[in-house]
Image (spheres, helix red, strand yellow):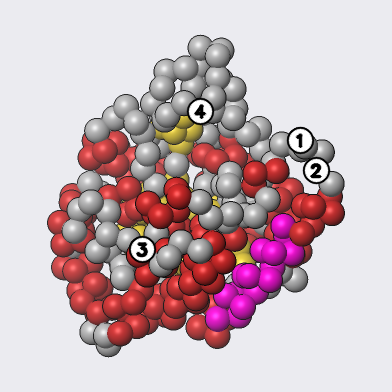
């Protein structure tokens, strides 16, 4: 059976869930990955009210949709980050508080623990999100940056996230980090280092999104195979690279998305350069049976048009794994004929 195709609602949080759910169904989706902002999934309300999760499920079910994951990227970002005024724009007031950086980080950590509890009430087994990073600013090693300095960043990540992951364990929920620039893990090498930092905690895995790896030059198909047992969710998002005017490099040149000078930019699924065909093969090879969740981003395209074609692309591309070897019939024939077939 092919995997369900879902829509991550983070880029649609301006629409109330009661409006988005039937729209998503009309665009061809089987479910929603609910963002923990807008009115799509309220962590506090899920813990405060026994009926909240049921009511959100009822909205989805009325539209013929399922929910396999919730995403809390914005709050997760603040757990390890060096907090500045940009975070105020993405965080709930209860997390921002007085803006004291350590207070923000601690409140964000508690909210991520609550997200695990709320997800369990919703009946989902995966929370996608970000971790933030205290060392992202040192990604380019000048002033000269020692490995001891980087080690401290991974130690900070482990100290802050191990208690969160223990709560995920208690609730029977996985945390799937979207490997992404600005996070503690942004490529395959840093992903491996993050796993090691938390002692291989079984609740720590990845929300695989090839769009953040391709333009960096990371082998994104190899990433799937390398971390086969830690791919807890998949985002289908496309990207194109190497197409700018030569004035902007991989670091972005402080340009905005959609700027024609950019060396890379996100594209509607199937219109970029990601080899999704090879990814489907890899998903089948590793036994990934979870959703293909479209995170739709394309600065130049109407989002309803784009999300509709993305759902169709994913369903056309996906296929179930083989039940056995394609040439197994010859083994049966050989057995039936005493080894003479062939």
Q: CA distance from mark 1 to mark 2?
A: 6 Å
* 160 within the magenta span: yes
179 in relation to 205, above or below: above
The residue singled out by tag 1 in the image is 142
The residue singled out by tag 4 in the image is 254
Going from N to C along the chain, the mark reached first, 3 or 2, is 3
Q: CA distance from mark 3 to mark 2?
A: 34 Å
Question: Looking at the picture, how far across and down is residue 130, in whole percent?
Answer: 52, 57
- Do labels 2 and 4 touch, CB within 8 Å? no
At horizontal 56% and vertical 66% (from top left) the residue drawn is 102
- Do labels 1 and 2 touch, CB within 8 Å? yes
Mark 3 element type: loop
Going from N to C along the chain, the mark reached first, 4 or 3, is 3
* Start-end of magenta stretch: 153-167
Mark 4 element type: loop
The residue singled out by tag 2 in the image is 145
Question: Looking at the picture, how far across and down is residue 295, in whole percent?
Answer: 39, 47
| Quadrant including the C terminus | top right
- Callout 2: few (<14), some (14-19), or many (20+) C-alpha neighbours within 10 Å? few
């Amino acid at each position: 059976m092919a995997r369900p195709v879902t829509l991550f609602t983070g880029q649609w949080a301006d629409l109330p869930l009661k409006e988005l759910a039937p729209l998503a169904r009309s665009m061809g989706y089987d479910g929603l990955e609910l963002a923990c902002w807008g009115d799509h999934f309220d962590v506090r309300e899920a813990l405060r009210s026994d009926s909240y999760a049921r009511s959100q499920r009822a909205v989805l079910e009325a539209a013929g949709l399922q929910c396999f994951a919730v995403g809390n990227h914005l709050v997760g970002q603040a757990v390890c980050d060096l907090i500045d005024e940009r975070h105020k724009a993405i965080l709930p007031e209860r997390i921002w508080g007085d803006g004291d950086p350590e207070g923000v980080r601690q409140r964000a950590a508690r909210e991520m623990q609550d997200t695990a509890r709320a997800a369990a009430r919703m009946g989902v087994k995966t929370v996608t999100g970000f971790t933030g990073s205290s060392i992202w600013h040192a990604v380019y090693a000048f002033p000269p940056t020692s490995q001891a300095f980087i080690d401290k960043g991974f130690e900070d990540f482990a100290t802050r996230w191990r208690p969160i992951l223990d709560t995920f364990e208690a609730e029977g929920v996985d945390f799937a980090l979207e490997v992404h620039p600005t996070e503690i893990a942004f490529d395959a090498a840093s992903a491996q280092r993050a796993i090691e930092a938390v002692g291989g905690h079984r609740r720590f895995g990845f929300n695989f999104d090839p769009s953040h790896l391709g333009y960096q030059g990371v082998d994104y198909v190899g990433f799937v195979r390398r971390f086969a047992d830690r791919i807890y969710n998949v985002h289908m998002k496309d990207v194109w690279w190497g197409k700018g005017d030569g004035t902007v490099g991989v670091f972005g040149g402080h340009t905005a998305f959609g700027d024609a000078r950019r060396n890379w930019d996100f594209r509607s699924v199937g219109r970029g350069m990601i080899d999704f065909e090879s990814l489907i093969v890899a998903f089948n090879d590793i036994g990934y049976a979870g959703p293909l969740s479209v995170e739709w981003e394309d600065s130049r395209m109407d989002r309803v048009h784009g999300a509709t074609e993305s759902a169709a692309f994913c369903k056309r591309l996906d296929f179930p794994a083989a039940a056995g070897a394609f040439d197994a019939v010859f083994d049966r024939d050989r057995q039936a004929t005493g080894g003479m077939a062939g």
